[in-house]
Amino acid sequence: MTIAQRLATGMPLLLLAGPAAAHHPMGGELPSTLWHGLASGLAHPVIGPDHLAFLLAIGLVAGLAGWGWMRPLSFALASLAGVAAGWLGLWLPAVEWLVAATLLLAGLLLLAGPAPRRAGWELLLPLAGLAHGQAYAEAMIGAEATPVLAYLVGLALVQGLVVLGVAALARRMMGLSRPLVARLAGFGLLATGLASLLGQA
């Protein structure tokens, strides 16, 4: 089994991570320095199963479909805007429910096969970015501007690395059944999204 297949089939294992950790990269402590903000930004997307699953999905689709960097960038920029809006006190309603909904929608798009439904992804990515960004912002409520800016840099870096790394792996899956990989990833996303919903009920 290749690394890319393991990524696709291993998404349900993300359910083993504790959901509370997704919003407290510094163990619940509010980042107060530039370095704390940067470390928190680097950690937040990868310790939350919902955020990490969505990033893996973006990378997988980008690699399978031969996307450039513009579509993943729309998610990343929207997530940074979501953080900034939350820090300024502008919140979307029911953010955690919206994050779970983005996982379910992405899962359904992946179940449709490896050829991405372009209009669906182009609509979903910026909206999902805003929702995930608002969830990221919860770790920075009350922080000063310097750690928040460092937090944004960390978020941008880690999201870019995860998406580009997974996309590079997916592009090398030449001899594999791409529909199977896409559908396995889709089931993983649906499972993660459902678990996120149940965790909030």
Image (cartoon, rainbow, N blue to C red):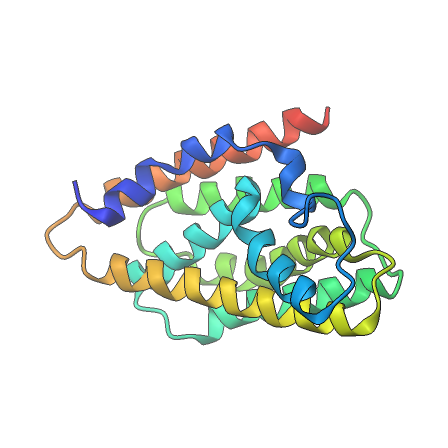
Q: Quadrant of residue 149?
A: bottom right
* The image quarter in which residue 170 lies: bottom left
Please state the horizontal and vertical placement of residue 52, each as a whole percent of the image: 50, 48
Q: In the image shown, does 22 or 112 lie closer to the viewer?
A: 22
- In this orientation, which residue lies closer to the viewer: 48 or 143? 143
Which residue is situated farthest in the left direction here? 175
Query: Residue at the spot x=31%, y=36% of the render?
Result: 9
Q: Picture coordinates of residue 100 (x, y %)? A: 62, 40
Q: Is residue 194 left or right of residue 55?
A: right
Residue in front for this viewpoint, 174 or 14: 14
For this view, does 196 lie left or right of residue 81?
left
Is 7 situated above or below 123? above
Residue 156 lies in quadrant: bottom right
Quarter occupied by the C terminus: top right
Q: Residue at x 69, y 54 (%)?
A: 136
Residue 77 lies, with reference to residue 8, above or below; the image says below
Q: Measuring 77% from the left and 68% from the top, which residue is drawn there?
A: 84
User: Could you say where residue 162 lies in the image, as x and y percent from the top left?
Assistant: 42, 60
